[in-house]
Image (cartoon, coloured by chain):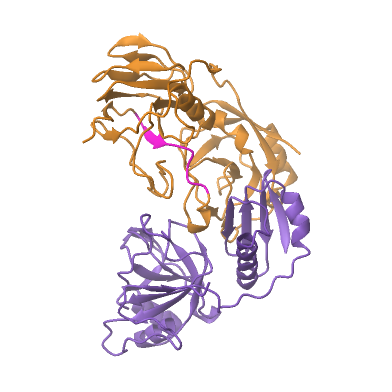
Amino acid sequence: MTDRALSVVRAGALTTVQDLGRPGHAHLGVPRAGALDAPAHRLANRLVGNPETAATLETTLTGCAVRVRTATTVAVTGAPCPVTVDGRPAPWGAPVHVPAGAVLNAGPATHGLRSYLAFAGGIDAEPVLGSRAADLLSGLGPAPLGDGTVLPLGRRYAPPATADAVPHPGPVTELVLPFRPGPRDTWFTGAGLRTLTTGRFRVSPAGNRIGLHTEGPPLERARSGELPSEGMPLGALQVPPSGLPVLFLNDHPTTGGYPVIGVVPERHLAPAAQAVPGTPVRFVRIA
Amino acid sequence: MRPLPVGEHGLLIELDSAEEVAALHAELLRRAADGRLPPVREIVPAARTVFLDGLADPRGLCAELATWDVPPPTTADRPTVTIPVRYDGPDLAEVAALWDVTPDDVVRLHSGTVFHVAFCGFAPGFGYLTGLPPRLDVPRRTTPRTKVPAGSVALAGPYTGVYPRSSPGGWQLIGTTDTVLWDPAREPAALLAPGTSVRFVPVDHPRIPPQAPTGAPAGPHSPYAQESAR
């Protein structure tokens, strides 16, 4: 085994290897996958001198801890959390030197949901269709981390960044999701569409990397039944028979038969990756 | 052809039939290959639609679409895949009853049909294959199986499919193949991409000799044979 590797000391609730995903294979039934909070993933990579395509670790709520075999530079971004190296406090959102054999711990998120851990050189897991991202819908890419999992690290690309604008995100007190109506908004009544923009919705605990589920008033349908399966975009607001919209995230199925009432543009999806269950959701119609 | 906007960069084109979908999909691939299509991230055919995503100017393409002359799909320029099948599925007798024929006739009808991959979905490498006449549509099983083995050849509605890996499933199982449908380490990873022609060849059948349907050039015992006229 190569020296450039990390071993997982504490995998946390759900920690996966992520990069920018594998777009371009939807016609084969392959989801895009990739970091849900893409800006945080990119920032973490920049902080350690990696290209944005390098693979990072995406944690869920409880963080994770890893031991590095050789000295390396690590940065933690996304959901803010206490960072320690062998128990000593280290900065969040900045390059951190981790000596050989030391344990880097990204603690539970103080707010938000998903933190990103970038290592100089990136996680060098075996790429599948050009990406190292774990796809939890179809099982492509590396399996979610377990305690004791060993992952190789790549060779360092560049010296760590000396300066970068690091936004320190505040808690998401309300998740605002701008959407464009369609393609199946006509499957809903005028009242159903009004319910979407005026109803009190919350983030449901049922969410995952496939979709953010909501709780709230069901949307009234103008017609019943299902569509013949059709292509589904990232950011789709798909409405299953419950009437409660599900926001499709990166591991979403590439086709589906429930009507899509609107689509949230990709650039507005990062906050959805950080909204904890119970967060109020407001859908805002854009032209 | 009815294009519907999907978000800021997508276009969902509704069509009236699976044939129109196949024709438009083939035309889109031709134009993409010739550099006559603006950059696009995904081209996803489905039952009655083609979805395009990652377009810089979906409205522009929308206007242009109306001027296209889309020829009907031809089978001549499609890649062809031959899949050897043991027609030993647990639902073979039930399908025979639904079709009102003998199980041997199911084998003859199914292996005598040239299918084509209308679209993919459900799992990586799972193709929805059309080609059987509408009178041979079968319902899904009322109780889905919790585990369908990889390589199961199955029917549901107007479609035939082959499970690329073991998974739950509600389709009627008529046979088994050793052909690997999905292998990310292979190029191409998916044997059955949209537009591909598919022939099933019976093997190890006591009464039906292994022979490819008329005109099939591939030997029946090769694990699979893929030719492309392109």
What residue is drawn where x is 53% and y is 72%? B230
Per the rendering, the colour in which chain B appears is purple
Task: Tell whether position B131 is magenta.
Answer: no
Q: Quadrant of the rendered structure where residue B84 is? A: bottom left
Q: Of B203 and A240, which appears nearest the observer?
A: B203
Q: Relative to B104, is A53 above or below?
A: above
Q: Of A122 and B189, which appears nearest the observer?
A: A122
> From this viewpoint, is residue A274 visible?
no
What residue is drawn where x is 34% and y is 79%? B93
- Spot occupied by residue B203 in the image (x, y as percentages of width and height): 30, 81
The chain painted orange is A
Q: Relative to A4, is B221 above or below?
A: below
> From this viewpoint, is residue B22 visible?
yes
- Spot occupied by residue A183 in the image (x, y as percentages of width and height): 68, 50
Q: Of B118 and B96, which appears nearest the observer?
A: B118
Which residue is at the far top?
A: A88
- Spot occupied by residue A257 in the image (x, y as percentages of width and height): 56, 56
What residue is drawn where x is 46% and y is 87%? B215
Could you tell me what secondary structure mostly forms the magenta stretch?
Answer: loop
Which residue is at the far left?
A: A1
The magenta stretch is A13-23
Q: Relative to A49, is B38 above or below?
A: below
Q: Quadrant of the N terminus of chain B?
A: bottom right
Which residue is at the far front?
A: A158
